[in-house]
Image (spheres, helix red, strand yellow):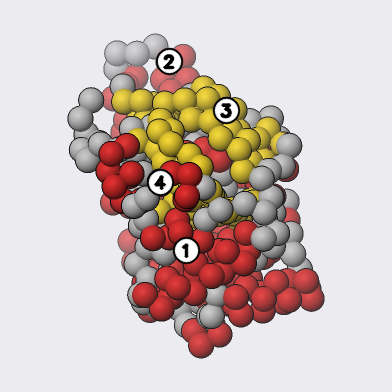
Amino acid sequence: MIRIENLVKYFGAKRAVDGISFNVERGEVVGFLGPNGSGKSTTMRMITGYYAPDAGRVSVGGHDLAEAPLEAKRLIGYLPENAAAYTDMTVHGFLAFAAEMRGLSGDAKKRAIASAVERCFLASVLHQSIDTLSKGYRHRTCLAQALIHDPEVLVLDEPTDGLDPNQKHEVRNLIRELGKSKAVVFSTHILEEVDAACTRAIIIDRGRVVAQGTPDELGRPLDEVFRRLTTSDTAKP
Amino acid sequence: MRHAWVIAKRELASYFASPVAYVFLVIFLLLTGFFTFTAGQFFERGEASLGAFFGWHPWLYLVLVPAAGMRLWAEERRSGTLELLFTLPITPWQAIAGKFLASWIFIALALALTFPVVVTVNVLGAPDNGAIFAGYLGSLLLAGAYLAVTCATSALTRNQVVAFILSVVACLFLILAGFNPVTDLMARWASPALVDAVAAFSVVTHFDGFERGVIDARDLYFFLAVIGFSLFATGVILRNR
């Protein structure tokens, strides 16, 4: 579903993403690992069409993101880093907005909102304004927005960031469940999530893929593998 | 167009979700009232027209319109929702049009709430209501031009204050290019053709006709061109974010 080839992105003179390639098929949950500043978010922003790559190609569901951005974006549900949302809206208003932007109306819209609310456990805060929500609820609101049109591809940037252990557990289960019928890629730097939710993991460091495979293929213990493969200070040249 | 309208609806709702809309409307009406009746000497003029009302609009809008438009893109950039918006299956133009439309509708609402001056002048005398209509049309276009400029400056930065100051300065240029004291000063050393050419870029020059009740196609095109160009610039700025 997701194919990326030789993606490159510069920020000034810094090569933030340096020739990353990988594929994600339907039925897979791919964990995208790497230290802070290794290019995870930048890569995800190129997959979702927020950044245009300086070189390389992204295609989603067979649609090239540079040539047919609207067709590709229709297939994607995206949870950005820090779970941005229009904070002056209520949870329901925000989800209704997301549904309408995805072309849903009438009964289809109502059903989509109800199902996203149920999946992300938002019923108790449905009519609360987003800026009054705790971080965990805000995060789940943004996740619900990503699921609203039942997309075939899910791109989740640190979906468990800022959640308490119970919520983390629920979100991981949700991701595993969604991964059965969709192509999911999510970034994290929590290694236990790889075992908990992923069918495959990709480790990147300083903009390059340094390892990929099932958690078992990567070797154990995972945190030792991770430390061996990545550099602790990404600011070093 | 449907997507642009969904964005416009959301944007309009967000004006009214905070005190911004109400503060703006009250201040706008207080200031138009003050300028028209006190500073504009509406009653002392003894004529049944709204010259005292419309004449102040280029200056009044100079401060108020950037205040209404400064958050349009700066806030999206600051809060990170720009990322959400631009990963939705829409073109940037739909988002730009939607947001501009929302703020323009908001200003139109503020302008519509000045209806008591129309009632007053109609009670006191027999004004030319066609001219008043032309004045309102011109005023709306003027506000649209300022708003489009504010869209572009707002897209430049994540800081609303910076966006506000930049758009006030840009709109001030649009006024001063045709403002009489400035053109008189220029006429001392520049050729009349140059003075006219510079003045042709001014909103004052083009607003004059509407104010007097004349709808000239050239003035209409001028304002539409400023709006079109500024929104195009907004698109270029957002693409190179």
Element at badge 2? helix
Q: Which amino acid type is marked by label 3?
A: Glu
Q: Between disc 4 and disc 1, whose residue precedes?
A: 1
Q: Nearer the viewer, mark 4 or mark 1?
A: 4
Q: Position of residue B227 (x, y in %)?
A: 56, 39
The numbered mark 4 sits on a residue in which chain? A
Read off the residue under disc 4. Answer: A219
Q: Between disc 3 and disc 4, whose residue precedes?
A: 3
Q: Residue at x 32, y 37 (%)?
A: A229
* Residue B10 falls left or right of residue B150: right
Quadrant housing residue B199: top left
Q: Which mark is residue A196?
A: 1
| Front in this rendered view, residue A168 or A60 | A168
* Residue B116 falls left or right of residue B133: left
Q: Which amino acid type is marked by label 2?
A: Leu
Given the current orientation, which residue lies at the most extreme right position?
A107
Q: Residue at x 74, y 59 (%)?
A: A103
| Front in this rendered view, residue B224 or A82 | A82
Read off the residue under disc 3. Answer: A5
Q: Do the residues indicated by labels 4 and 1 lie within the same chain of the protein? A: yes
Q: Residue at x 25, y 36 (%)?
A: A231
The Cα–Cα distance between marks 1 and 2, rounded to whole angstroms, is 73 Å
- Please determine whether, in this image, residue B22 is positioned above or below residue B154: below
Q: Nearer the viewer, mark 3 or mark 2?
A: 3
